[in-house]
Structures are given as C-alpha cells and as structure tokens.
Amino acid sequence: MRIDPGVNGSLAPDATTFAPGMRLLKRTPRTDVYRLYRVLRTVDDLVDEDRPQAAQRVDALEQWASDQRDTSPETHVLSQLARHYPLPASALVDFCQAMRHDIARDTIDTEDDLELYCERAGGAVGIMVSSLLGISEPEDLTRMATLGRAVQRTNILRDIDEDLVFRRVYIARTTIDRFGHPRPGARAELLRNQIAVADELYEKAAIRPRSRPQRAIALSAALYREILRQIEREGYGREPGRVTVPAWRNKLLIAEHRLRLHLTSAAI
C-alpha cells in the first residue's frame, strides 16, 4: 500500500495530490487532517520499507483502537486527535489489517480480494478523515469510503513498477491470468480494465459540494482521478515509471473547479 508521498517520500502538505483540496479547509481541521495522514504515512513507510519495527508499530495502533493507550509516537498523536474528534476505532483496525497484509506479503487472488484490501487500506482512511471533517451522514460516509477505495486503486496503478521492484503485486492474480503480467509495454488491456473499475468507484463516490469540507474532498478527488487520465495519455504503461500529472494541468483543474463552484453559488 502507498499513501500519496508528496516530495522525496515525505507527506509535505503543499506537495501531495490532496493538498489543494485541503487548503480549502479552515486551519484547524486542515492541520489535523495532515497530522492524521502523517501517522498513517509513517506506519505505511515502515511497512513498505520492511523496517524491523513495522509490526510493533502496527500492533501499537491496533492496541490503541482498543484502549487508547499511548505506546508509540503515532498513538500519541491519535490520542490528541481523539480529544476533539470521534475517531472510528473500527476503521483504524481495518487499516492495520491492510498493513499486516503488506508485512506478510499476502497474495491478492481475486478482484473481490483486491476490493477488500482497498476497503481496508483506502476506505478506512476515508472514514477516518470524515471524522475530522464532520462528515457523518451515512450516505456521505459510504461515499467517502468508496472514494478511499478509488484512490487506493489509483495508487496501485500509478505505482505498479515501483511496487514490482520491492516484489509487491497489488493486481489480482485472476486479472493477471486474464490480461498478462503488468510489464511496461504489455499492460494496456490490463490498465484499461482496472482504470474502468476505478472510474466507476469515483462516480459512486461523487459528493455534492454543499459544505467547505465537501468542496475540499471534491477537488481532491478530481485531482486524484486525473492520475488515471495521465496513465491513458502516456500510453497505458508503455514506458516504465511512476505516473505524475503535470503541475500546469493540475492548476487548470483547480481553476475549473473553482469556476464551477462560483457558478453554482451564483445560481442558488
């Protein structure tokens, strides 16, 4: 699993794909969302880099979900956040299960297995972020969890080559059997198939931007979905490497998003 790493692997607030959307938030929730992301990113890095302390830090998160005891730097931050927000323990446990999957290098056999992994790795993050943004309506929570799954699938497609270097495969075995191994220049059909799945999730996750937090999420989702379009523009993995949307294109999307919001507000 990989959370959007920003610059040089750090979760720099001004460098992540989600940052432009998060800048629409008021300062306190924006800062707290970044704090939560740093917690998750730190543990994710430890796991991805096969650090010896990774399992212990995952254990600490899972234990915190049960009794909120501070036993690691990450749980200390969670305890601070929990004083102000109803952090959902079940979502944190789901995230930890995804981390354990990565530590064990378990195989993803079917698309259903991949959906479950994305629900735990990405959907759980969407639920936790919702608690910080005051998003609590059941329908909106479902959309946030779905968005998390869409983002996780996007991460997987963006990082195929990087994951393969570390002997990690997040494409379902049945999908590889159907379309072939996702090697550069030989994965166009596989990527078309997987992009279609992710796009469907983004459509299901679309949140009507009625509030400031919802507007922030809508912009972040649009920027993240653009990664899929960039994969298409670059020939569906014709060349190896991590796909990055050019800065000018992101700026154009941000401007278009703001214009739509302005026109919507004027019409109301």
Image (cartoon, grey):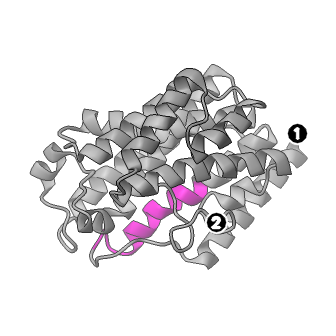
Q: Which residue is mark 2?
A: 12
- Residue 41 appears left or right of 14: left
What's drawn in magenta, residue-wise? Answer: 222-237
Circle 2: element type: loop
Depth order, front residue of 242/265: 242
Tell me residue 261's x, y (percent): 79, 51
Residue 223 magenta: yes
Residue 114, located in which quarter of the rendered image? top left
Q: Is residue 204 visible?
A: no
Amino acid on which the number 2 mark rests in the picture: Ala
Q: Which mark is residue 58?
A: none
Q: Residue at x 49, y 36 (%)?
A: 60
Q: Residue furthest front?
A: 71
Name the quarter where the C terminus is drawn: top right
**Observer-nearest residue: 58 or 177?**
58
Say if residue 239 shows up in the picture: yes
Name the residue that disc number 1 marks: 268
User: Disc 1 marks which amino acid?
Assistant: Ile
Residue pictured at 63% horizontal, 57% vertical:
18
Where residue 95 appears, x then y in whole percent?
A: 45, 37
Image position of 159 with respect to 195: above or below: below
> Is residue 266 within the magenta segment?
no
135 relative to 144 in the view: left or right: right
